[in-house]
Amino acid sequence: MIIPGAETQAFAAALSEAADEPLGRVEYERFPDGEHVVRVPEAVAGERAVVVASTVDSDAHLQVLQLQDAAREAGANEVVTVLPYMGYARQDEAFREGEPVSSRAMARAISTGTDRVVTVNPHEPAVCDFFTVPATNVDAASVLAAPLPADLDEPLFLSPDEGAIELAETVRDAYGTGATDFFEKDRDYDSGDIDISPSDAAVAGRDVVLVDDIIATGSTMSESVAVLNDRDAERVYVTCVHPMLASNALTKLSSAGVESVYGTDTLERVVSDVSAAPVVAREL
Ligand code: R5P
């Protein structure tokens, strides 16, 4: 039985269909003091419970722990936890003195209530090692090819930094034609400012598809789009697995002149045009 977190209901429904497993109707409530309580269906007794929740904020983190515990309490014989978007995955080391390895802290907490974990394109796949139960990453980048127009002209699939080049290659392979390249990116950790150094790729007159794992503030992508505009790229499409789109990210991208933004439904946003659920279903 699929047990959705409150912020991940559309993904859970898609997963239920793709995996052909029943969708449990969970109740989410809060006590007057603000504390959460969830209720899972009794029918999970004797079944495998698949808790599906993107840990998009602190409440969602807490809810995962409650859903796992409620499923066990109701008699589930196995608990699998799917994190379509794993929050804090980018804090995978103590970048400055005194900081935590947040992804390790989260992974350890989540491990206490589950037999197994499945994540989708965490920023660093190595975060899986922080779980103390078996954990696997699935790569959903291939689904990002589907919403792209069929008539891309000499397409270049470009990642804003070298770390995401494999994602760009995956989208190119799924699209069926095109070249790949990557930019160099530097981020000033004090100001958050992004500096993009272009590669030598010839982009004038070509359609370009930017590919990344996540769009958070939109700075990386909008700076990349600005470079492409300076170099007379034709149409620029922006794709990512996790469309976090914090604050004014979508406005930044629109004003930078992108043709369209496409993301998956690991985070439920207006640009979540394509589902990563079938990829997760195969892993389940
Ligand atoms: C970092 O290297 C990631 O792959 C993304 O490029 C980054 O997190 C995007 O962040 P933002 O949208 O805030 O620039």
Image (cartoon, rainbow, N blue to C red):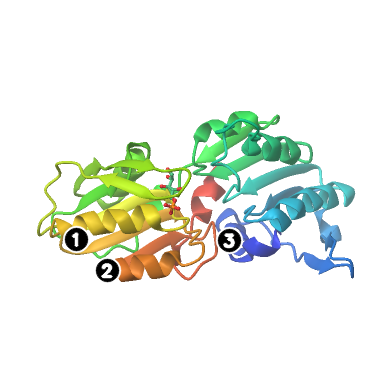
Sooner in the amino-acid sequence: mark 3 or mark 1: 3
Q: Amino acid at mark 3?
A: Phe
Give the left or right position of residue 41, taking residue 20 as reference. right
Q: Amino acid at mark 2?
A: Gly
Q: Disc 1 on helix, strand or loop? A: helix
The image quadrant that residue 98 belongs to is top right
The residue positioned 56% from the left and 49% from the top of the image is: 281
The residue positioned 36% from the left and 64% from the top of the image is: 261
**Residue named by callout 3:** 11
Labels 3, 1: front one: 1
**Residue 123 location (% of width, % of height):** 49, 41
Label 2 with label 1: CB-CB less than 8 Å: yes
Sooner in the amino-acid sequence: mark 2 or mark 1: 1
Distance from label 2 to label 1 (Cα)?
8 Å
Classify 22 as above or below 91: below
User: Depth check: 110 or 174 in front?
Assistant: 110
**Residue named by callout 2:** 257
Label 3 with label 1: CB-CB less than 8 Å: no
Sooner in the amino-acid sequence: mark 2 or mark 3: 3
**Residue 117 location (% of width, % of height):** 65, 40
Does the residue tagged 3 have its C-beta within 8 Å of any atom of ligand 1?
no
**Residue named by callout 1:** 229
